[in-house]
Image: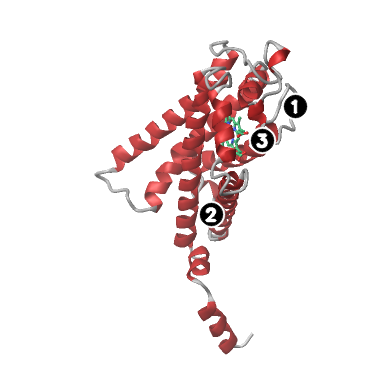
Amino acid sequence: MNVATQELRRRRRTWIGETWDSNVGKKSIVAVTGLVLVGYVVLHMIGNLTAMLGASGDEGHAQIDSYGHWLREFGTPLLPYEFFLWVIRVFLLGSLVVHVVGVYQLTMRARAARPAGFPAKRIGRSWAARTMRLSGPLLLAFIVFHILHFTILAVDVTPLAEGEIYSNVYGAFQKWYFVVLYLAAIASLGYHLRHGVWSLFQTLGIDTPARNASLRHGATALTVVVVVGFAMVPISFATGALPEPVTGPNAATAAHTPTEVAK
Ligand code: HEM
C-alpha cells in the first residue's frame, strides 16, 4: 500500500476506530460498557427481589411474574410485544461483547509489550488482575448457562414454564446443586464488581489520593448490596422462608396451572 493510500485511510478513520485502537481509548470503552453491565446487574437484582414479596400478590400471581410480564408488554400496543425487552437484550449483548473483546485485546497487548525474559508474574498479574481474569470467564460461562436455564428454559431438570418466573426459580432452588452454583456465580460477580468498579474509577480518572479511601468503600458497599441482594433469593427459597408457588408447574395444586400471565 502506498503512502498516499495509507494517509487517505487514516483520515477516513472514525474517532470510534481511533479510540478503540489506542490503549487509553480501549480502556475507556471497557469502563463504559462495564458501567452499562453494572447498571443492568443492579436493576436485575432489584427485579429479583420482587420474589421476596411472595407467591401471590397481584390477582393471585406472584409479583415477580407480573414484573416479567410488564417488561414484555412495555410500550404495547404502540410497540410490538417484547420489543422493549429485545432492545435491552441487544444493547446488553453488544456491551458484553465489546467489554470482553476489549479486555482480551488489552491483556494480549500487555503481554506482547512485556520485555523478553521478564518474569510474567511481575507485570499485570496482581491479585486484583488475577481475580478479574478468573471471575470474568466464570461469569461469562454462568451467563450462558443462566440464559439457557431461566430465559430459554432449556435446563429443565426441575419443571419450568414460560412466564412462571416464581415457580421456575422456586423449583430450581429446591435442588442444593443449583443453590451452590448460583451462590458461586454471585461470589464471582462480587469479586468482579469489587475490582471492576475500582478500576472504573481509575480509568475515568476520578481517583485522587484524597478520595481513594471513599471510592474503595463505595465499590465495596455496592458489591455487598449486590451480593446480598442476589443471594437472598436462592437462600430464601432453599430454606423455606418463601412460600410454595400458587401458579405454575411447581404449584402445590395442579388446578392453578397454567396461568394467563404466561402470555
Ligand atoms: C440468584 C441469582 C439470580 C436469579 C434468581 C436470577 C433470575 C433470573 C430469571 C428468572 C431470569 C429470566 C427472567 C425472565 O424470564 O423475564 C433471568 C434472566 C437473566 N439474568 Fe438472572 N438471575 C440471577 C443472577 C444473575 C446474575 C448474577 C447475572 C449476571 C451477572 C444475571 C444475568 C441475567 C441475564 C443476562 C438474563 C437474561 C435477560 C433476558 O432474558 O432478557 N442473572 N435471571
- Report how far apart the C-alphas of labels 2 and 1 lie in the structure: 50 Å
Callout 1: SS: loop
The C terminus appears in which quarter of the rendering?
top right
Ligand 1 picture quarter: top right
Task: Give the SS element for disc 2.
Answer: loop
Does residue 93 sit above or below 155 in this rendering? below
The mark that comes first in sequence, 2 or 1, is: 2
Q: For this view, does 58 lie left or right of residue 206?
A: right
Answer with left or right where residue 56 lies relative to residue 250: left
Residue 222: image quadrant is top left
The residue sitting at 33% across, 40% down in the picture is 215
Residue 220: x percent and y percent?
A: 39, 33
Report which residue position mark 1 lands on: 156
Which of the two discs, 2 and 3, sits closer to the camera? 3
Q: Which residue is mark 3?
A: 151
Badge 3 vs badge 1, beta-carbon distance below 8 Å: no
Tell me the CA gap for discs 3 and 1: 11 Å
**Circle 2 sits on which residue?**
118
Q: Helix, strand, or loop for circle 3?
A: helix
Residue type beneath disc 3: Thr
Q: Nearer the viewer, mark 2 or mark 1?
A: 1
Q: Position of residue 225 (x, y in %)?
A: 42, 29
